[in-house]
Amino acid sequence: MWKISHQISGDKATSSLEDNFADLQVAALDAIIGYEKQGEGKNGKFDEFCDTRGFDKYIKTVLWNSKNNKGARITKKASILKGVVSTNDNEEVIQIEGDNIGSIENNIFFEEIKVKLDEKQRKILKLIIRDPKLITEKGKINILRLSKKLNLTWKECFEKVNQMGKIIKNEL
C-alpha cells in the first residue's frame, strides 16, 4: 500500500503520504467486506479467502482504482489550489491586519472582472457579494435562490453562472 500511496500525485497541502495510505487502508477494509458479501457470502470469511488468487486480484484492483480516483480529484482541484500556501509553514498568512484585509485586492479583481461580464453577470456578482446566503456550505452558488432574486428561470441563471465560472476560471 505504501508503494501505491507514493504514486498518488499532489502536494502535501492536498494529500500527504499518510493521508493517502489511510485512504487506501479504508478502501482495503471496504473491499474485504464487499468481497465477503459477493454472491451472498459464497467466498466465505476473510481467513478462508485472504490467500486466494481471486481475492489478490480483487484487492489490487480496488487499491489501484482508489488511487486513480483520488488522483483525479486532486488534478481537478489543482487549478483552484494553484498558488495556495501552507498556513502551518507561513503563519503570517493568517495574521489579520485589520477589518478591511484584502479589500484593495478584491476591488482590483472585481474591477478587472466586471469588464469581462455582461450586465446580468455583473448583477449576479453584486448579489453574491452582498448576500453570502447565496453560497452553499460546500462553496457553490445556490442557483435556485439566486434565480428567484433575479427573476430568471433556473436554467438561465445556471447558464450565466457557468459562463462566469469559465471567465474567472473557477467552478461556481
Image (cartoon, grey):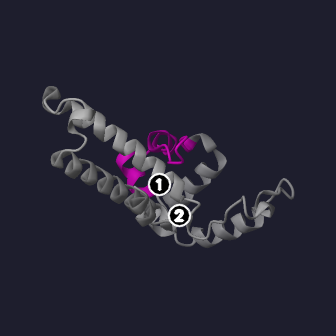
- For residue 57, above or below residue 167: above
Q: Measure the alpha-carbon separation of dots 1 and 2.
A: 20 Å
Q: Amino acid at mark 1?
A: Asn
The boundaries of the magenta stretch are 134-162
- Residue 130 in the figure: left or right of residue 94: left
Say whether residue 126 is visible. yes
Of 76 and 70, nearer the camera is 70
> Residue beneath label 2, please?
80
Q: Quadrant of residue 11?
A: bottom right
Instruction: In this rendered view, identify the residue nearer to me: 12 or 170.
Output: 12
Given contact means CB atoms under 8 Å apart, are the residues at marks 1 and 2 in contact?
A: no
Residue at 55% of width from left, 45% of height from top? 135
Q: Position of residue 96 (x, y in %)?
A: 83, 56
Residue drawn at 62 percent across, 66 percent down = 84
The mark nearer the N terminus, 1 or 2, is 1
Q: Which residue is mark 1?
A: 20
